[in-house]
Image (spheres, helix red, strand yellow):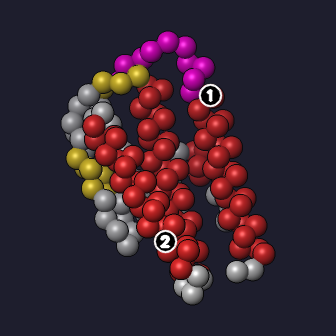
Amino acid sequence: MNKLAVLLLVIVIVAVALGWLYYYLSMSGTGGVQTTTRNTTTTTITTTVTITTQVTTGELSSVEVEAIKYMAEEERLAYDVYTKLSQIYPDISVFANIAKSKETYVNAVLSLAEKYHISIKLGELGVYNNTHIRNCMIN
């Protein structure tokens, strides 16, 4: 693996971590518990693996809801990065192994969202709803 690929990977991971920290700190300043009701929807990840979650209405604080949505997209970003690296470097199996682990993490967060009745829509490979994650992307 060349130095540029490693540097790119480190930059993406650091950018996502900093974005999550900024997002979490900005959301925790809302003061107090707020309740949000979500409607029933179906979510599908369209990549090599399709993950679907059906949810019903429920209540959580807006900070908790946004944190779970952010976790889903952050894990999806990591899945996308390692999937792309495994395509670029097919002879290095560690990228495919990590992508598979990240798929497990995406499923875990979607299960958590289902448990708390949170509607999460994850886009296609490289497409993210959260502006903080989109701003971390390197074109």
Which tag is nearer the camera, tag 2 or tag 1? Answer: 2
Report how many numbered discs are placed on residues in the image.
Answer: 2
Q: Is residue 2 toward the left or the right of residue 92 in the image?
A: right
- Image quarter of the N terminus: bottom right
In the picture shown, does residue 12 fall above or below 59? below
Please name whichever residue, 136 or 94, is drawn nearer the observer in this view of the structure: 94
Q: Which residue is mark 1?
A: 26
Residue type at mark 1? Answer: Ser
Residue pictured at 34% horizontal, 68% vertical: 49
- What is the magenta range? 27-36
Q: CA distance from mark 2 to mark 1?
A: 34 Å
Based on the picture, tell me whether residue 9 belongs to the magenta stretch: no
Indicate which disc, 2 or 1, sits on the residue closer to the N terminus. 1
Residue type at mark 2? Answer: Asn
Q: Which mark is residue 97?
A: 2
Question: Would you call the spot at circle 2 few (<14 residues within 10 Å), some (14-19), or many (20 or more)?
Answer: some
Q: Position of residue 60 (x, y in %)?
A: 36, 24
Q: Position of residue 48 (x, y in %)?
A: 37, 73
Q: Position of residue 51 (x, y in %)?
A: 31, 59
Residue pictured at 34% horizontal, 41% vertical: 112
Q: Is residue 125 visible?
A: no
Q: Quadrant of residue 131?
A: top right
Q: Is residue 15 visible?
A: yes
Q: Is residue 62 toward the left or the right of residue 86 in the image?
A: left
Q: Quadrant of residue 8?
A: bottom right
Question: Would you call the spot at circle 1 few (<14 residues within 10 Å), some (14-19), or many (20 or more)?
Answer: few
